[in-house]
Image (cartoon, rainbow, N blue to C red):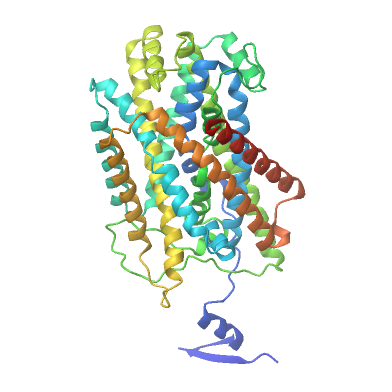
């Protein structure tokens, strides 16, 4: 027999099962799986995760390889971003169902995981190669020789921007969406104006691995650079995992009930936080239907924004590099100077202002990428440190925002120190960081997919085909990373 407690409030009597009162006190009450929102209201997180790769893979590494070897390597960009689409969706799957980031789930299974994520994230992304590239192009525009003195203020400016917002996520979404929606069409226009039908044919052939006198990989190409570009075909490294944080903060699925990171100067103080999500009745047909509705819509959103726009942006940037810098030849020893060469050729072939606008767009997109990277890495390290600290806090009170900003400014300080120590060559810094992050991506791919298999309800897990694809990606990244490291060490 069910026992009820009667609450009298004014003239109304409310009958509540005593078992439910018990769950409320313990904070265990199951919530409803929210109804899916319209597709247009879901757009946002994919823009952020896409923008994280703009300054590394899209603008620098793939165009750099194209400037030296032609478009026959374009298949790597296609395969890389396709891999990341499937990876990101499995990360989103967990956050959608659990209403928490994958870091929370992984920590429950592997207590050492937070230390790994903090260490690998700081080492992989603390190296300030992206902002160095932005500063170098900007220095060329304004005629300054030593671009370190531009890079340092750029880093400080990023810290100020991220510290000043009311909430970090909403500000990041607005910035990245604006930059992408303006920058991508502009690059497309330049590619159309400067390329010929033969250039487009070369791009089409390159997407299936046919180059000028080679298949897939040309002779002499650096495996480390190719792996770096492959890993950064999208976000790369541990940055992919922040997709679970962003979709949670956007309120996807069970993330509707989660907390948000407030700005550094907001009124929120030291408060009790809940990093864990809430449960729902997995046997409810309504909840299952709502999950399937969410999954269908977020799959489309990520396919359109991340995969399609990302692939088009990379393809057009490679095409632009092929139509301009590749014609100069001998770009291999010039670092990111091939970007400046592109701007010069655009100005000469069209008119000078367009060349300047192209370089200005590169500066903004690289700056925005570094801003996004510092936000994402600070979230990763902040949440993992908070998870460990909460183990020793019975009241659950911790200021997640201050931990976030502590890691943000620690990374900025680390970057400034490297610049002052004359460690600032952009391409070298980007490649070193990318190779480290390729290995980190291999690790988190295995952790996330094992967790999803062990933890998620079977009705909501990936299909057999998708699981097979994830195993294939895991093997590919593992073998590629080992071969690259072996070839560079021995």
**Outermost front residue:** 490
Horizontally, residue 261 falls left or right of residue 66, namely left
How many numbered marks appear?
0
* Relative to 291, residue 43 above or below: above
User: For residue 14, what is the image quadrant?
Assistant: bottom right
Q: Position of residue 318 (x, y in %)?
A: 52, 21
User: For residue 77, what is the image quadrant?
Assistant: top right
Q: Position of residue 91 (x, y in %)?
A: 58, 51
Q: Position of residue 94 (x, y in %)?
A: 60, 56
* Relative to 373, residue 56 above or below: above
* Relative to 264, residue 15 above or below: below
- Give the quarter of the figure containing the C terminus: top right
Residue 216 vs residue 134, the one in the foreground:
216
Q: Position of residue 138 (x, y in %)?
A: 29, 26
Horizontally, residue 439 falls left or right of residue 344, namely right
At a point 54% along the width and 36% down the height, the residue shown is 231
* Relative to 303, residue 33 above or below: below
Horizontally, residue 486 falls left or right of residue 143, namely right
């Amino acid at each position: 027999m069910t026992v009820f407690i009667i609450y009298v409030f004014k003239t109304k009597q409310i009958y509540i099962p005593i078992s439910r009162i018990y769950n409320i006190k313990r904070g265990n009450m199951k919530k409803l799986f929210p109804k899916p929102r319209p597709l247009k209201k879901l757009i946002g997180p994919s823009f952020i995760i896409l923008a994280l790769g703009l300054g590394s893979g899209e603008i620098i590494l793939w165009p750099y390889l194209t400037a030296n070897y032609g478009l026959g390597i374009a298949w790597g960009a296609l395969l890389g971003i396709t891999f990341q689409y499937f990876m990101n969706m499995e990360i989103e799957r967990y956050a959608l169902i659990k209403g928490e980031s994958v870091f929370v789930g992984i920590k429950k299974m592997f207590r050492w995981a937070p230390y790994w994520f903090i260490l690998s994230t700081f080492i992989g992304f603390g190296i300030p190669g992206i902002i160095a590239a932005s500063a170098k192009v900007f220095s060329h525009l304004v005629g300054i020789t030593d671009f370190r003195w531009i890079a340092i203020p750029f880093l400080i400016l990023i810290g100020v921007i991220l510290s000043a917002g009311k909430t970090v996520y909403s500000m990041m979404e607005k910035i990245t969406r604006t930059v992408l929606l303006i920058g991508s069409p502009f690059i497309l226009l330049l590619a159309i104006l400067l390329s010929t039908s033969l250039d487009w044919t070369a791009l089409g052939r390159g997407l299936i691995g046919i180059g000028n006198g080679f298949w897939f990989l040309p002779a002499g190409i650096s495996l480390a650079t190719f792996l770096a570009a492959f890993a950064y075909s999208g976000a790369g490294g541990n940055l992919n995992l922040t997709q679970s944080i962003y979709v949670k903060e956007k309120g996807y699925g069970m993330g509707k009930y989660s907390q948000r990171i407030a700005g550094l100067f907001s009124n929120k103080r030291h408060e009790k936080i809940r990093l864990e999500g809430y449960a729902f009745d997995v046997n409810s047909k309504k909840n299952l239907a709502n999950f399937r509705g969410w999954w269908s819509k977020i799959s489309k959103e990520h396919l359109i924004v991340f995969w399609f726009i990302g692939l088009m942006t990379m393809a057009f940037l490679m095409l632009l590099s092929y139509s301009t810098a590749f014609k100069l030849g001998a770009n291999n020893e010039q670092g990111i100077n091939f970007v400046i060469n592109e701007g010069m050729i655009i100005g000469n072939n069209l008119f000078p202002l367009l060349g300047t606008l192209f370089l200005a767009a590169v500066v903004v997109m690289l700056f925005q990428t570094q801003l996004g990277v510092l936000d994402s890495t600070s979230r990763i390290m902040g949440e993992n440190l908070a998870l460990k600290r909460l183990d020793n806090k019975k009241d659950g009170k911790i200021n997640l925002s201050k931990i976030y900003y502590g890691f943000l400014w620690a990374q900025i300080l680390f970057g400034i120190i490297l610049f002052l120590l004359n460690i600032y060559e952009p391409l070298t810094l980007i490649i070193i960081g990318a190779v480290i992050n390729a290995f980190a991506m291999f690790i988190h791919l295995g952790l996330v997919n094992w967790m999803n298999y062990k933890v998620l309800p079977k009705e909501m897990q990936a299909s057999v085909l998708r699981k097979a694809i994830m195993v294939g990606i895991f093997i590919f990244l593992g073998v590629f990373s080992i071969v690259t490291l072996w070839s560079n060490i021995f």
